[in-house]
């Protein structure tokens, strides 16, 4: 996907924050972009901004709850009617759901996993068959988080989903590379977004929450001026699509912590000689070429 001009992208959660940054970067690069978002106020604001841009007709917006599979299918049909075949899917929709696991209730888990992980699954299930059918090459970006790599306390639901998105992206990468479809796990650090406003989109059916007061407090938390600008974030996603990166990271500051985590994992393996016979019997499980490819490309 080095050449993106004239192609079409579908971005969930695309009307604000990181999603709007991605949408803006893709439009600036010459793509047609369908913005899907659950909040109509964010859609209106985003469209107003694009109306003043150099390519106002390159953006189409629609309201979408990513947990609604039927609505996802209708949105895909709408996207294809508007701009034709979709070549880039950015499964970005999400929200902040934070708090101690000791007070979480089933509604918190169901809502959090339904959006943060289920929304990614729904995007893949909706668009992947269409991408395979048109056969023109495609790329899928699944938004995880640095929290999926470096877990922190009081975010078990969020981290469960984000860690799963990384594993899902790696599995898809292994399966789809030969079919001309690239896959990236996007792991941003702190970005100036509306992630703290999650309670505004919590459906009534998930109202039995242990996090009600925490969500009110989170909404009042200001963004730091030191957090990354969403457009810079979007530019990094665009570069990752063009390079076909497996991992798209945004913040150098997390590298040492990630290194420590991976060294801790390696140090925890049994300190004993390799069982050569057993290793030969399960050699298909012992490595994955996608990781060697990442290392080789970084060396070149």
Image (cartoon, grey):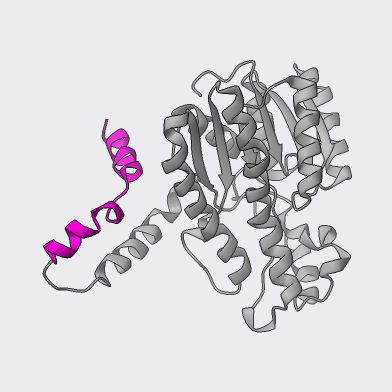
Q: Residue at x 43, y 34 (%)?
A: 177
Q: Give, as a single range, the part of the protein colored magenta.
A: 275-300
Q: Residue at x 82, y 47 (%)?
A: 38
Q: Main secondary structure of the magenta part?
A: helix
Pick the residue in front: 58 or 10. 10
Quadrant of the snapshot with the C terminus: top left
Pick the residue in front: 22 or 254. 22
* Residue 296 magenta-highlighted: yes
Residue 3 to residue 273: above or below: above
Which quarter of the picture shows residue 21? Answer: top right
Q: Is residue 251 visible?
A: no
Which quarter of the picture shows residue 46? Answer: top right
Residue 50 to residue 228: above or below: above
* Residue 292 magenta-highlighted: yes
Q: Farthest front residue?
A: 281
Q: Residue at x 71, y 27 (%)?
A: 33
Residue 6 to residue 243: above or below: above
Q: Farthest bottom residue?
A: 102
Pick the residue in front: 240 or 136. 136
Instruction: Give x and y (percent) for residue 213.
Output: 80, 76
Q: Is residue 234 visible?
A: yes
For this view, does 121 lie left or right of residue 289? right
Instruction: Give x and y (percent) for residue 109.
Output: 69, 70
Q: Residue at x 82, y 62 (%)?
A: 202
């Amino acid at each position: 996907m080095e050449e993106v001009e004239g192609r079409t992208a579908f971005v969930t959660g695309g009307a604000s924050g990181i999603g709007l940054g991605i949408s803006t970067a893709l439009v600036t690069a010459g793509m047609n972009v369908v913005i899907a978002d659950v909040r109509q106020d964010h859609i209106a604001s985003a469209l107003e901004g694009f109306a003043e841009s150099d390519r106002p007709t390159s953006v189409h917006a629609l309201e979408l709850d990513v947990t609604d599979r039927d609505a996802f299918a209708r949105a895909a049909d709408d996207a294809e009617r508007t701009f034709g075949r979709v070549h880039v899917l950015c499964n970005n929709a999400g929200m902040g759901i934070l708090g101690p696991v000791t007070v979480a209730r089933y509604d918190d888990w169901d809502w959090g996993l339904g959006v943060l992980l289920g929304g990614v699954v729904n995007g893949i299930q909706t668009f992947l068959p269409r991408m395979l059918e048109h056969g023109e090459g495609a790329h899928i970006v699944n938004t995880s988080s640095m929290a999926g790599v470096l877990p922190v306390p009081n975010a078990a639901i969020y981290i469960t989903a984000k860690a799963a998105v990384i594993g899902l992206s790696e599995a898809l990468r292994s399966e789809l590379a030969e079919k001309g479809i690239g896959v990236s796990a996007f792991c941003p650090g702190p970005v100036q977004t509306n992630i703290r406003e999650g309670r505004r989109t919590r459906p009534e059916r998930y109202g039995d929450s242990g996090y009600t007061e925490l969500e009110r407090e989170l909404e009042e938390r200001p963004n730091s001026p030191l957090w990354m600008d969403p457009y810079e974030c979007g530019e990094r996603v665009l570069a990752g699509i063009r390079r076909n990166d497996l991992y798209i990271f945004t913040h150098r500051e997390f590298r040492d912590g990630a290194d420590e985590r991976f060294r801790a994992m390696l140090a925890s393996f049994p300190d004993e000689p390799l069982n050569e016979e057993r290793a030969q019997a399960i050699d298909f499980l012992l490595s994955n070429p996608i990781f060697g490819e990442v290392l080789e490309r970084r060396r070149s």
